[in-house]
Amino acid sequence: MKTKDKDFEVTETVEVSPEVEENIGKNRFKLDSAKRNLKTRLLSTIVLLFLLLGFVCCGAIYTSLKTSNIGNPEIASYFSIILTVILTVICIFEMNKVMGFKFWYYQVLIITISIILLLFPTKYSLYNFSFYNELNLVTWLQSWQFPIIITVYLLVTIVISVSDKRINTKNALINFIMTLIIIFALKAFSITSLSLDNNLARFSFNTIVWIWMMMILSDSFQYLGGMRFGKTKLSPNISPKKTWEGALIGMGTAAIIGIIFAMVFQFVKPLQNFQPLREPMQALGDKTIALEIIVYILLALVFPIIGLFGDLLFSWIKRVVKIKDYSNLIPGHGGVLDRMDSILFSLFILFIFISCLPV
């Protein structure tokens, strides 16, 4: 049974795949269904990469114009923030939909609170860009304000779940936690892409490129490696198509390319101002270059694992509510959350990291 809502389609059946049981351990590229699915996924991936390029380029343009002191760089920052808000709305809409908050008034209420949480600053030292520069955050921003908004959101979620018997309380709490993960992840995107220090990127938009590149490589090679060499199921109750062989191939490929990418920006002098996590990594490099290199290697090894955990987390939620995809917005991939699960969780961890920095 399927229910449709404009451009979104939520499938109310458990994700099952007869091919997994019968063909696990075989070269599934020989299957006609696999060939068709691969072609669709490739075309969708190409379109997504172009959209991603435009999205990330906003931060690159802003940083370049700000550093060169030419033009009006704030236009790029506003454009980046607007795109981030749009992406937030789509992600929260999908999550609300599958967790039972389907009615338009629930959607409007939760999405409105989500946008407030997305835009509200958490630490004034991280928000020295765009319109935040005009808000004089240092004079009024307090550490208790953001938790108050989160508490209000939690109370709204509880009230809705108690008053509407059609919404499971467990699902409501999952929805609350997952929307916070999405919001913090996209806050990390804006902060990392746009935050400056003396007209130099504090963390560099290249951090997003680095992490997102590793997630794309990991996801893609997990899929390709699993299709060709997959034999041992990774988590049959959560994501039956994933295999340990595919996971190791995907994460290994992502880690190797991630290390090479980081080392290029580490050792090529003209690129050093754009190295991933520029400010904290250069602070380590001032003590010892070896420590900086070790941290880059560790991060390149850890982030693909974080991405895999995020993928499994979002897949587990689909299992909880018995759906195949979050929506059918992207042919061959499902919804935005189906495609961005690993990067969202990785950016969520990135947000925790940059928020814990002493400055």
Image (tube, helix red, strand yellow):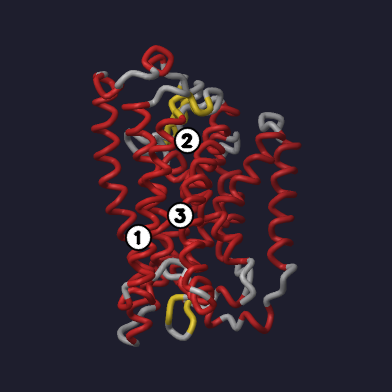
Above or below 21: residue 288? below
Q: CA distance from mark 2 to mark 1?
A: 32 Å
- Place of residue 317 in the rendered image (x, y in percent of width and height, measured from the top left): 57, 34
Q: CA distance from mark 1 to mark 3?
A: 10 Å
**Circle 3 sits on which residue?**
300
Q: CA distance from mark 3 to mark 2?
A: 29 Å
Above or below 94: residue 322? above
Element marked by disc 1: helix
Looking at numbered disc 1 in the image, what kind of residue is underneath it?
Answer: Phe
Contact (CB < 8 A) between labels 3 and 2? no
Residue 250, image quadrant? top left
The quadrant of the rendering that contains the C terminus is: bottom right
Looking at numbered disc 3 in the image, what kind of residue is underneath it?
Answer: Ala
Closer to the camera in the image, 219 or 42: 219
- Place of residue 16 in the rendered image (x, y in percent of width and height, measured from the top left): 46, 19
**Circle 1 sits on which residue?**
261
- Place of residue 356 in the rendered image (x, y in percent of width and height, measured from the top left): 64, 66
Q: Residue at x 61, y 70 (%)?
A: 357
Mark before the other along the chain sequence, 2 or 1: 1
Q: Residues within 10 Å of mark 3 (few under 14, many from 20)?
A: many
**Circle 2 sits on which residue?**
326
Mark before the other along the chain sequence, 1 or 3: 1
Q: Residue at x 42, y 60 (%)?
A: 208
Closer to the camera in the image, 99 or 163: 99
Q: Residue at x 33, y 77 (%)?
A: 269
Mark before the other along the chain sequence, 3 or 2: 3
Residue 101, image quadrant? top right
Element marked by disc 2: loop
Above or below 176: residue 58? below
Q: Residue at x 51, y 74 (%)?
A: 288
